Amino acid sequence: MKKLSSVVLAALLFVSTLLFVTPNANAQTASPIVYGKTYYVQNGYNNWGGGYLDTRSTGCEKNLLCVSTASSPDRAKAKTGTWKMLSATGKQNGTPVVVNDDIYLQNLYPFRTDILGGYLDTNSAGCEGNLYCVSTAGTKERSTYRTSHWRLISTEPEPISTQPTPTAIDNSGTISTELGKTYKVQVTVDVPSDIGYNNSFGIFAINDDGSVAGVKPGDANYATTVVKNRILSVEVDKGSYTKGQTFKYDLPGGRKYGVFLIANGTPTQFLESNSENKGYNPPLAYFFDTAANPDQKSHVKVLPPNQYGFEDVYGGGDQDFDDLIVKLETVAVESTPTK
């Protein structure tokens, strides 16, 4: 996945070149654009002389605030030109934005206490002889036609990076992938020096309805089904990890993926000695969805940036979620050859 430098913001056919600049920065930021952070949006007309995206006045197109460009990023000293990057698909704040992501842009002018300056939106046609008029809306989903949804498109080819990038984990604890691609993922584990259990983890594919091989969280045989259908990795399945140890996975696109923890055991030991996932003595399998856990407690938490933290004690333990930490990074995304 590509990081963004110069980008195009596109909703429908809105294709003016724009540059995202971090507020208070002295120069263009070289860091990736990140969800939950705020940016100025600079227009590229006449060698970046097209001004900064700004809210001013009310009532345009019967929407919340009018949108145009201002000569400075903080025209009114009230954040009229400050925009927050939000995911429209559930990606967590702190996650890097990548090309073709579906996003919202929230204006931070304190016009209303609940939504501030609203969400960048298209409404009505023909403004200034152009395609659609742009203003802000009072909700993220003013219309069923996705008028407040925007997409970032690279204006120039980017070199393929050999550096791993965070693998996006959404609020439901799952990783989404695109059909027709293979995701080469690097997993790095962090194991506390004073850990009492010898834990292991696994990655598994999830159907669109949340099931695995037709079995859903809360069903009696869910844990066994997940562990049996995990993405096999001989080294991962051995357990006995050391701090900083890395593993490689090739994940086929078009599926969602999740992780599980085997507390004080390996997947094989779990299947041999406690496949029903009952009782309070390990080995026990724990999942992000508490309905699948033997104690119905939370044992898996998404930690920034794109890590899973595990709690290995029956009953929820101390809820520090640092008994095992698993960091996922995408090393490369390859197109899958079609037959």
Image (cartoon, rainbow, N blue to C red):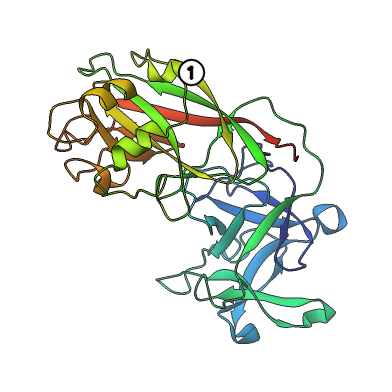
Residue at image location 70% in from the left, 66% down from the top: 11
Residue 83 horizontal side relative to residue 152, left or right? left
Circle 1 is placed at which residue position? Answer: 246
**Quarter residue 144 falls in:** bottom right
Q: Residues within 10 Å of mark 1 (few under 14, many from 20)?
A: some
The answer to whether any part of residue 29 appears in the image is no
Residue type at the position of mark 1: Thr
Q: Residue 337, percent across and down?
A: 74, 37
Q: Residue 295, percent across and down?
A: 16, 42
Residue 313's place in the image compared with 96, above or below, is above
Residue 239 horizontal side relative to residue 264, left or right? right
Residue 44 horizontal side relative to residue 107, left or right? right
Q: Between residues 163 and 29, which one lies in front from this camera angle? A: 163
The answer to whether any part of residue 84 appears in the image is yes
> In the image as oriented, which residue stretches furthest toward the right?
46
Q: Secondary structure at mark 1?
A: strand
Q: Residue 217, percent across and down?
A: 31, 48
Residue 217's place in the image compared with 274, above or below, is below
Q: Between residues 163 and 28, which one lies in front from this camera angle? A: 163
Q: Residue 62, percent across and down?
A: 60, 87
Q: Between residues 111 and 328, which one lies in front from this camera angle? A: 328
Residue at image location 38% in from the left, 40% down from the top: 302
Residue at image location 80% in from the left, 49% down from the top: 155
